[in-house]
Structure formats: structure tokens, C-alpha cells
Image (spheres, rainbow, N blue to C red):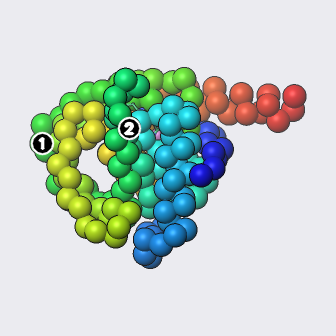
Amino acid sequence: MALREIIVIPDTRLKLVSEPVAGVDAEVRRLADDMLETMYEAPGIGLAAIQIAVPKRIVTIDLARKDEPKAPIVLINPEITWTSDELSVYEEGCLSIPEYYEEVERPAKCMVRYLDLEGKTIELMCEGLLATCVQHELDHLNGVLFIDHLSRLKRDRVMKKYSKAAKREATA
Ligand code: GNR
Ligand code: NI
């Protein structure tokens, strides 16, 4: 297992559409392992491979609290096959947009189909924070960030702030 660096905005790689994985092999399993380690260390409740600069359709999720046993989920080539008409609002954050939080409205429930680490097809009904997290992560696979769901004004403000910070970093 290895800890990987999480890329942050305005890194343009976060806009890439990630490629499907051809098969669940040793390389995919190693990548998923690295993603879990990186996600736990951050700490975060979800991670998409593109956040460690790998444009593959792999997601890790673990909603267990600190005092609970780990409950990792690895989703390979995930697809949302159904979303509820009912919506819900959660305050979201993103490891690629550190220390910024804002409310986002999304379908309250969704059905996701994916391959697990054994290459088996799984269908999982999601609600609550899991539904939000799954949708947030699948957005990453399509180059979409949660700030893309906000008003242009809010998004532009966030992008400007992080672009300035990146420039300061580069010239420091
Ligand atoms: O750690 C994370 N918390 C979170 C909170 C509300 C909605 C979505 C998330 S996902 C985020 C980790 C991350 O950036 N995943 O891409
Ligand atoms: Ni994110």
C-alpha cells in the first residue's frame, strides 16, 4: 500500500473523463488499496481515482465513523441506474477543494451498479449520505466537481481563490 498525493483545483486533470477499467486485475487491486489508504489518511469518506491523478473509473467509499470498524466499498466502472425524484440537500466538501463546504441538492436516493474487487456485478440501493457520496464520486469520473452544481458566482469565487493560492505557491 502507498499513500498518494491528492490533486486540488485548479488542476485541470480534475476535468478529465475517466476511462473504464478493462478487468479487475492486480494493478486495479493495488490502485484501490492505495486509494483506500489515501482516503483514510486524508481523512475523507470517498475518493475517485482521478483525485490521485489516475483517470480510471474507480471509486472508494467508507462512511464508518472513527469509533466504528472500517467498512470500505470499492466501486469499479460504477453506473447510476436509477435516481429518485425526491431530492435532498447535504453540505458537501471535497478533498480536491480543501476547506470549502457548501450545500448541494441531489436526488435523495439512487441505485448504483458496479464491479467489486472480485469482478462481480453488484447493485446497491443508496440513500442518505451514501446516496450523496456516490453521486459526488461518480461526478468526479465525468470531470464534474460539486462546485459545478453551485451558482456561477459561487463557483467563480472559489476557483479564483484557489487559483490565486496556487500562483502564490508557485512563486514563493
Ligand atoms: O470526504 C468527503 N466528504 C463528503 C461530504 C459530503 C459530500 C461528499 C463528500 S466526498 C468527500 C471526499 C471527496 O472529495 N470525494 O471525492
Ligand atoms: Ni470530491
Q: Amino acid at mark 1?
A: Asp
**Residue 75 is drawn in which quadrant?**
bottom left
Residue 94, given in percent of the width and then of the height, sits at: 48, 34
| Residue 108 visible in rendering | yes
Instruction: Name the residue nearer the viewer: 123 or 93.
Output: 123
The answer for how far apart the CA atoms under marks 2 and 1 are is: 31 Å
- Quarter in which the C terminus is drawn: top right
Local secondary structure at mark 1: loop
Query: Is residue 18 visible to the viewer in this orientation of the structure?
Result: no
Residue 19: image location, x then y, percent? 48, 67
Image-based side of 43 in relation to 23, left or right = right
**Residue farthest to the right, as pictured:** 172
Residue ranking furthest to the left: 85
The residue located at (41%, 25%) in the rendering is 66
Identified at 56% across, 35% down, the residue is 41
Q: Earlier in the sequence, mark 2 or mark 1?
A: 2
Q: Which residue is mark 2?
A: 70
Q: Which residue is painted at 71% across and 28% down in the image?
A: 164
Residue beneath label 1, please? 85
Residue with the most extreme front position: 69
Horizontal side of 116 relative to 163 (left or right) equals left
Q: Residue 45, labelled with which disc?
A: none
Q: Is residue 129 left or right of residue 23?
A: left
Label 2 neighbourhood size at 10 Å, few (<14), some (14-19), many (20+)? few
